[in-house]
Amino acid sequence: MPIQQESMFTTRDIQATDAAHHLHPFTNTGALNAKGARVISKGEGVWLWDTEGNKILDGMAGLWCVNMGYGRQELVDAAAQQMQQLPYYNTFFQTTHAPATALAQEIASVTPGDLNRIFFAGSGSEAVDTMIRLVRHYWSVVGKPYRNIIISRENGYHGSTIGGASLGGMKGMHAQGGPMVPNIEHIRQPYWYGEAGDMNEEAFGKACAQALEDRILQVGPDNVAAFVGEPVQGAGGVIVPPANYWREIQAICRKYGILLVADEVICGFGRTGSWFGSQTLGIEPDLITMAKGLSSGYLPIAAVAMSDRVADALIAHDEDFNHGFTYSGHPTAAAVALENIRLMKAENIVDYVGTDIGPYFQQQLRATLAEHPLVGHIEGVGLMAGMALVQDKASRTPFPEDANAGLVCRDHCFENGLIMRAVGDRMVLAPPLVISRSEVDELCEKARHCFDLTLASLKQSE
């Protein structure tokens, strides 16, 4: 239905049309159709409204992406102006255009190290697929095509295309749509609270990094192309690795000459209090994948940034790189991304997250929620946080799987004006970067109320 006619349709009309024609991502669509999808109709700042008039604090910035908040007229205007001049043209036919060129330069100016060459895609999943091909093609052009094994982590998330799903370590995704892409290995994740046992964080960080070296030696160092990881695991539940973890990982990659790839689709563009999570966590990657915050989610756009070492080898090979997308460097999406970065710089957003609202968010979460009977552990950095729900805090005993503690909590949140994501029994928050201190306070109070409701529900169902 045309957007201007939306007000002519009731919520029930929209839900019925949705049920009849729309297959939702990562959703039991049959169960949703029986319930009826919630119809979101408006956004402003950190707030959303549904068609029933309910006001909701978006604690997930859409899907980790609406960093500059809803309703930014500057981004709307950038899209409109570019559409009037050149709404679309490709970059296949030895052509370019100003938005893609300027955006590539702008991204290179904020990435760490010498990541000076940019390849554009339309989504984080496409960026990851691109990275897989770039990594393997790089080793081929330098005369080592046998280096084609890529190592990532269990419970890591790298998108939902066949390449991204294969690289990620989500078992539920591997169970559907296989077989997966070959020559991808998975090692343990650095989830200290849930998997370290009696080890302290430093010892656990070293043990998790050692798992990478052990796997490299198992499959043969000359066969390994790259290690790929999110600086902070996002869709895995916001898992912040021990402080020594990335230093150890990087040393192992350098020891064996393996490319180090940071998947920054979630962590990039200010989320951790630096332009990229790599800068916050002290990583010096050879390639970075990015999306989401690049345009604050206003239009789909993604990119892979690569070091001079990688790019120079590909360019010197003097042959087509037979990969790309119709919308690689889409001019309107690029124009919006450019304006988004300009706004971030003008409003000093990265510093705001790093030195002001990020530390305040982390402090207030702990002050408000750490002592709650449900909350076993809170971890996070910048404006992202994960909270483990447990049956017993002292022993870290989780709830039985069939209790669905996370989903119970998520539903209470949604019914009480807060979007907070459930990843198993970890509750996840990643609000827009423009959130204010008073809005953080309101978020924390809403979360505490919803935890109270969740605890009551779980006790009632015992």
Image (cartoon, grey):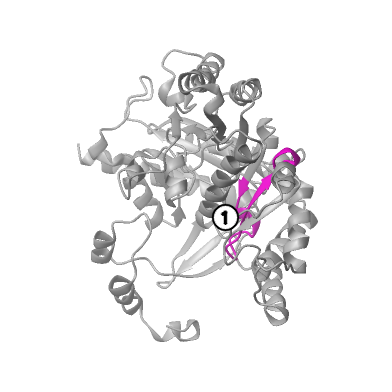
Q: Which of 82 and 266 is in front in this view?
A: 82
Task: Please identify the quarter of the rendering in which residue 69 is found.
Answer: bottom right
Q: Looking at the image, which residue is at 70% across and 52% down?
A: 118
Q: What element carries label 1?
A: loop
Residue occupying the point 41% across, 87% down: 8
Eyeballing the image, is 348 above or below 37?
A: above
User: At x 56% / y 40%, what residue is drawn?
Assistant: 136
- The 10 Å Cα crowd at callout 1, few under 14, some 14 to 19, many 20 or more, is many
The image position of residue 449, as x and y in percent, is 42, 46
- Whether residue 139 sits left or right of residue 307 in the image: it is left
Point out the stretch of residues depicted in magenta.
Answer: 289-310
What residue type is disc 1 on?
Cys
Q: x, y percentage for residue 159?
A: 47, 49
Q: Is residue 239 left or right of residue 74?
A: left
Looking at the rendered structure, the number of numbered marks drawn on it comes to: 1
Q: Position of residue 301 (x, y in %)?
A: 60, 60
Q: Give the answer, above or below, for where 410 lies relative to 238.
A: below
Residue 105 locus on image (x, y percent): 78, 55
- Relative side of 7 to 310, left or right: left
Question: Which residue is outermost to the left?
Answer: 462
Report which residue position mark 1 lands on.
65
Q: Is residue 309 magenta?
A: yes
Image quadrant in which the N terminus is located: bottom left
Q: Residue at x 61, y 37 (%)?
A: 139
Q: Nearer the viewer, residue 461 or 214?
A: 214
Q: Which quadrant holds the C terminus? A: top left
* Residue 370 visible in image: no
Question: Image height check: is 78 above or below 244?
Answer: below
Looking at the picture, does residue 204 appear above or below residue 324? above
Say if the magenta span includes residue 265: no
Q: Quadrant of residue 102?
A: bottom right
Q: Which of 192 and 321 is in front in this view?
A: 321
